[in-house]
Amino acid sequence: MQEKSDLLSELCDFLYPRSSYYGQFKPEYLVFNANLQEFAQRVTYICNLQTGGKIPPEEAYKQIQSLWKQLKRTKKQLEIE
């Protein structure tokens, strides 16, 4: 069972890499940084799907626009200038 857990952990690390945060430490900055990294990762996946012909450009644009709006909402909720 431990072996399966390690494999899943490694797979998640590969698919969703996280970089350390080196900026000024505030809890809201740390949360926003995590959200920003997730945004960047998801945009990369969408771009690759579009480049590979799996989704049309219009769909890729809509998905990225939706992700951007989510990121802006998060920034506003965290009250980051």
Image (cartoon, grey):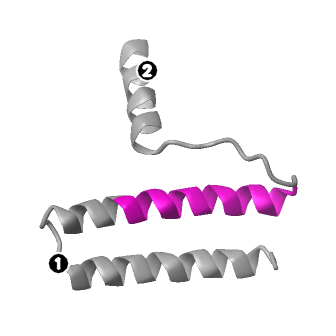
Q: Say if the magenta span includes residue 39.
A: yes
Quarter of the figure that contains the N terminus: top left
Q: Residues within 10 Å of mark 1 (few under 14, many from 20)?
A: few
Q: In the image, is residue 14 above or below residue 28?
A: above
Q: Residue at x 58, y 74 (%)?
A: 71
Quarter of the figure that contains the C terminus: bottom right
Which of the two discs, 2 and 1, sits closer to the camera? 1
SS at mark 1 in the image: loop
Mark 2–mark 1 distance (CA, rounded to whole Å): 36 Å
Q: Amino acid at mark 1?
A: Pro
Q: Nearer the viewer, residue 2 or 75?
A: 75
Q: Nearer the viewer, residue 57 or 12?
A: 57
Occupied quadrant, residue 4: top left
Q: Is residue 72 left or right of residue 69?
A: right
Q: Amino acid at mark 2?
A: Asp
- What is the number of the mark on residue 28? none
Query: Residue most toward the left?
Result: 53
Of marks 2 and 1, which one's residue comes earlier in the chain?
Answer: 2
SS at mark 2 in the image: helix
Q: In the image, is residue 43 above or below residue 5?
A: below
Q: Residues within 10 Å of mark 2 (few under 14, many from 20)?
A: few
Q: Residue at x 43, y 20 (%)?
A: 6
Could you tell me what secondary structure mostly forms the magenta stretch? Answer: helix
Q: Nearer the viewer, residue 8 or 18?
A: 18
Q: Position of residue 9 (x, y in %)?
A: 45, 29
Specify the segment rendered in magenta: 26-44
Circle 2 is placed at which residue position?
6
Q: Residue at x 22, y 80 (%)?
A: 57
Circle 1 is placed at which residue position?
56
Q: Residue at x 31, y 66 (%)?
A: 46
